[in-house]
Amino acid sequence: MILLRHGQSEFNAIFSVTKRDPGIPDPKLTALGRDQAVEAARTLKSERIGRILVSPYTRALETAAIVAETLGLGISAVTPLVRERYAFACDIGSPTSELAAAWPGLDFAHLPERWWPEVEEPEASVAHRARSFRAELAGRPDWGETLVVSHWGFILGLTGVRVQNCEMLRCDPTEPHPEIISWHH
C-alpha cells in the first residue's frame, strides 16, 4: 500500500514556525497544501491505485479528494482507524453530521457523531490502531493497490517513519510491525 500524509494544513503552517498549538480545530488545507496534493496526485498517476482510504479529518479528506479526482477514482472509505493521534487542537474533528453535509458523496454512516477521542491519545493506543490496521490490510488481496491518506502520527505508528506533508511511503502490511517507534526526536 501507499501511505500519503495530508497536505499542509492551516495548523501546520503556523505550528511549523512557532512550535505552539495555534488552536485551530479540524483545519483545512492551505493553498500550499492543495498544491502539494495536486503534485502528489500527479506522482500517483503512475501507480496502480484501485482503492483510496482516508481519515475523517478535513485536511485528509481535502487531500484525498484532490488525488481521487486526478486519478479518476472515488474515495472508497472514510475510516477513523487511520486518524491522527489526538494531541493538539487540530485533532478535534468535525462532527459526522457536518462532514456528511460537506462531503455528500461519502459514506459517514458508520461513524459516531463524535469519532475522535475525548483526551490526549497515548502513543501506545496509536500503535495498537496501526497494528489493527496492518492486520486488516494484510488480509485483503487488494492491499497493494490501496492508497491511505492519513497523518504524521498514524504513519509513524504504522511504520516508525516520520513523513512531511504530502510525503508518500510504501508499506507492506504483511511485514512485521516495527518493534521500536521513536515518538520524540
Image (cartoon, rainbow, N blue to C red):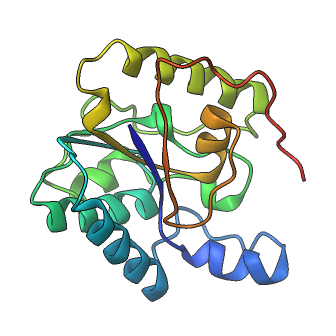
Identify the residue shown where x is 24% and y is 33%. Answer: 109
x and y, in percent, of residue 105 in the image: 12, 52
Quadrant (top left/top right/bottom left/bottom right) for the N terminus: top left
User: Extreme left residue here?
Assistant: 72
Furthest-front residue in view?
46
Q: Does any portion of residue 93 appear in the rendered image?
A: yes
Nearer to us in this view, 28 or 135: 135
The number of callouts visible is 0
Q: Note whether 106 is above or below 5 in the view shown.
A: above
Which sits in the foreground, 41 or 122? Answer: 41
Q: Where is residue 16 shown, x and y percent of the image?
A: 74, 77
Q: Residue at x 67, y 35 (%)?
A: 157
Q: Percent from the top left, x then y, of residue 148? A: 39, 44
Residue nearer the viewer, 98 or 53: 53
Looking at the picture, does residue 129 appear above or below residue 55?
above
**Residue at 57% from the left image edge and 78% from the top image edge:** 10
Residue 149 location (% of width, % of height): 41, 50
